[in-house]
Amino acid sequence: AGAVVNWFHTYLPGWEWVGSIIEIIGETGMAVGAIFGIILDNLLPGTPEERGLTHPEWVA
């Protein structure tokens, strides 16, 4: 993640804060998992039933 910060510092002077935000998000496992979950949830095909998002009738 440090390479991202260095890239913003070298190529985009004044935008170091963007690299810092990306670095912080990249170091937080929960945030990375949430981002991947959102992306995969919207990209992978399938009905809600095929993806396991529905409950059987017998579950109350």
Image (tube, rainbow, N blue to C red):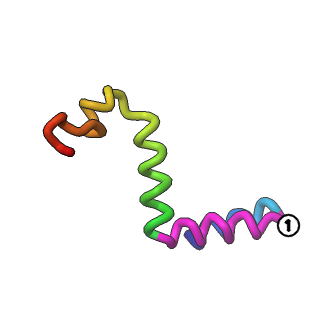
Lateral position of residue 50 relative to residue 32, left or right: left
Q: Which corner quadrant holds the N terminus?
A: bottom right
Question: Is 59 one of the magenta-colored residues?
Answer: no
Q: Quarter-wise, where is residue 46 in the image? A: top left
Tell me if I can see residue 6 in this picture. Answer: no
Q: In terms of secondary structure, where does tag 1 sit? A: loop
Is 37 drawn above or below residue 28 in the view shown?
Answer: above
- In this view, the residue in front, 57 or 39, is 57
Q: Residue 2: which quarter of the image?
A: bottom right
Q: Position of residue 14 (x, y in %)?
A: 85, 67
Q: Which residues are magenta?
A: 13-28
Q: Give the residue at x 47% y 61%.
A: 32
Residue 27 drawn at (x, y percent): 51, 72
Point 80% across, 60% down: residue: 12
Q: Nearer the viewer, residue 58 or 14?
A: 58
Q: Is residue 17 left or right of residue 4?
A: right
For this orientation, the residue located farthest to the left is: 58
Q: Position of residue 18 (x, y in %)?
A: 72, 63
Compared to 5, does 38 lie above or below? above
Amino acid type at mark 1: Gly
The residue lying furthest to the right in this view is 14
Quadrant location of the C terminus?
top left
The residue at which mark 1 appears reads as: 14
Residue ID at (80%, 64%): 15
Most frequent secondary structure within the magenta stretch: helix
